[in-house]
Image (cartoon, grey):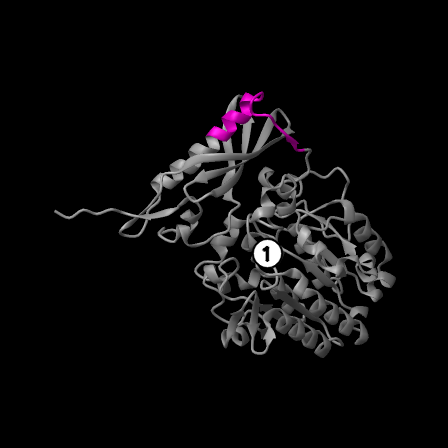
Amino acid sequence: CVIPNYAKKLKLTETKDRKQSCGQRAIFVGYNTFPNLMSVLTGMNMSSIYSACHPNMYSCNELMIWSKFRKAGYTTAYGEDYLRLPDTFFRHNGFKYTPTHHYMRPFFITGEQQNGNVICTGHRSSGKQILNYAYDFADTYKSQSFFGMFWINSYSHNLDNLPSLFENDLLNFFEKARESDILNNTFIVFFSDHGIRYGPMRLLEESYYEERLPMFFVWVPNEFRTLHKQEYYNLQLNQNRLVTPYDLYATLAKISNMSANSADITSEACPSCKNLFEEITTHRTCAEAGVISKWCSCHDMKSVDRTIDRDATNSLQLAVSYVQGMANEIQTIDGMKCHSLQLEAVLRTHAFKGVNKTYYVVAFQMKPGQVVYETTVLKENNEYSILDSVDTLTAYNVRGNCVKNENDRKYCVCKKLNIVRT
């Protein structure tokens, strides 16, 4: 079972209860929270999501997995903390109306504040408020059918948030759930959207995989293990096989209609993806699982010496030129512009093979600003191309605040224009 670095900081991941649950070998499908979370909630790819969720998130609420549960007679709930983050639904105009029967956003709007490296609401951390709410919700409806989606950003989103602070609250949640018999008939999916995306740890070679392998554990209720032995056996088999958010969507959809014994619901973005109660082949590829090459981690990546491998040098030059070109074309607010960027250092160069193609992963630092970038360059038929995008490994700060388009921020180190009046 793959446990990302931030999960290793939780002693809970080494407890007996964790070992009795199922930890999956999951791969994410997008750069940040929104695509990875939406793939779980809708089973759709980003182009379909952007089209369906315009002008706001409520436009696509019927596509959300909690709506499928609601239609199946379940009581539903959704909660998310650290509301000022732009990674999830805030940037997409949020929900105009309450998306579920129970909705936590109004509670956090009343006074979420930052106290050091802890996000608080009232006299408790926002993360603890969510866990308390999740427990109360489950305990209230434990004799009925219910579905709750509770997303905690505040303990681990930024580098100054400490997942270890989460441990006691999380242990308390599971202990109370056991004591109140919630675990007997309730699935609990404990997962993250991605690994660490920026900061000093991303400079390490293994961080390429760290980013792409989110945390994913499933608590299987005791009743299900007894009544559905083959499905439980398959779920255990799938622990060490390639799993994606699309499979999780199909699994949740299966649970929602299991009592109706109706046809399985599959992911629109990955029609061949399966729910995790079916055995997944050991030979599954990223393409078969709906994962594009940029995010695939099913390969053997090796270090490359640029002084020997000319293709690696060409790949680096293409990546640097791409960043420089983007910086020179960005539209900024009046009186500001982006610095012209120059290569300062090459941090690492690796490569892995595909069928009649080679992928070069390069990480490099540009100046001024000491911004670190990483990208994957595809070499195929003696041609080179950037695979999907160039990403920054340096934490966002005020350096790019002068851009008009938020998506350009990572390529810009702002400076004031020198305007001489005559």
Q: Position of residue 232 (x, y in %)?
A: 82, 56
What are the residue bounds of the magenta stretch?
301-317
Q: Which one is nearer the viewer's eye here, 180 or 112?
A: 112
Q: Is residue 6 left or right of residue 13?
A: left
Q: Secondary structure at mark 1?
A: helix
Residue 5 is a magenta residue: no
Q: Position of residue 83 (x, y in %)?
A: 51, 66
- Mark 1 Cα shell of 10 Å, populated few (<14), some (14-19), many (≥20): many
Looking at the image, residue 393 lies above or below residue 150: above
Residue type at mark 1?
Answer: Leu
Q: Is residue 127 left or right of residue 385?
A: right
Residue at the location (69% across, 70% down)?
169
Q: Tell me if residue 265 can be seen.
A: no
Label 1 belongs to which residue?
37
Residue at the location (63% across, 30% down)?
303
Residue at the location (60% across, 65% down)?
67
Q: Quadrant of residue 305?
A: top right
Q: Position of residue 110 (x, y in %)?
A: 50, 77
Q: Position of residue 55 (x, y in %)?
A: 43, 60
Q: Which one is nearer the viewer's eye here, 334 or 187?
A: 334
Looking at the image, residue 207 lies above or below residue 102: above
Q: Residue furthest left?
A: 422
